[in-house]
Amino acid sequence: AQSVTQLDSQVPVFEEAPVELRCNYSSSVSVYLFWYVQYPNQGLQLLLKYLSGSTLVKGINGFEAEFNKSQTSFHLRKPSVHISDTAEYFCAVRGGSEKLVFGKGTKLTVNP
Amino acid sequence: DAGITQSPRHKVTETGTPVTLRCHQTENHRYMYWYRQDPGHGLRLIHYSYGVKDTDKGEVSDGYSVSRSKTEDFLLTLESATSSQTSVYFCAISRSGGAPDTQYFGPGTRLTVL
């Protein structure tokens, strides 16, 4: 079975600062990894996903994530955040015939 | 945006009453899912469907039932609502059930059980 740990429940940053949201996973099989974003009072929207190939994945809104198999991590990064990036971010993992498993989420607050 | 609607968007009900939430899609995707979202728990799978009349349980299925009589509609029923079922419910769809397949989410239904 898979599991996901998002290491920070809340991350406050100032506008234009870089940010990293951390995600670690455990799985006994090869995995596919996803980051979703949820803006206030909305559903989840896919930011990016890792399926195979290059370990650096680029997504929408300037976000990127790096898959690190040896450290079982899939951290999300953005070099310069905007106020509009304030949202909750969910890491999710899926492998084999297992269901999509979500982390508990990280609330990113971008302050002016 | 994926063509997914959920109804109602908000509902307040009393303990012991039956409640049905509806998810409707216009994408003709085979798989449909119901999740609940609670603070500190992320999203947890309740039930899912892999075709008309084909459903299976998820992680937190107790107290919930589902039905899918048409490709486009997936219903979630709380037979006798309890306060512990106060939550935000999300429907999701995917083209296939394959591991790399993306799930697309609806806008959610906020349910309060008094």
Image (cartoon, coloured by chain):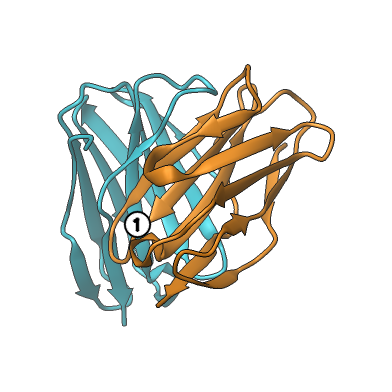
Chain colours: A orange, B cyan
Q: Is residue B62 visible?
A: no
**The N terminus of chain A appears in which quarter of the rendering?**
top right
Residue depicted at 72% across the width and 23% down the height? A30
Give percent across and percent down for residue B90: 34, 51
- Subunit that carries the residue with mark 1: B
Residue ranking furthest to the right = A70
User: On the image, which quarter does residue A28 sit in?
Assistant: top right
| Residue behind mark 1 | B89
**From what the image shows, is residue A20 above or below residue A97?**
below
Relative to residue B18, is residue B95 drawn left or right?
Answer: right
Q: Residue at x 49, y 66 (%)?
A: A108
For the C terminus of chain A, the image quarter is: bottom left
Give the residue type at disc 1.
Tyr
The answer to whether residue A25 is above or below residue B109 is: above
Label 1's element? strand
- Residue toward you, B91 or B112: B91
Q: Is residue A31 left or right of residue B32?
A: right
Query: Would residue B64 be seen by someone viewing this image from the given angle?
Result: yes
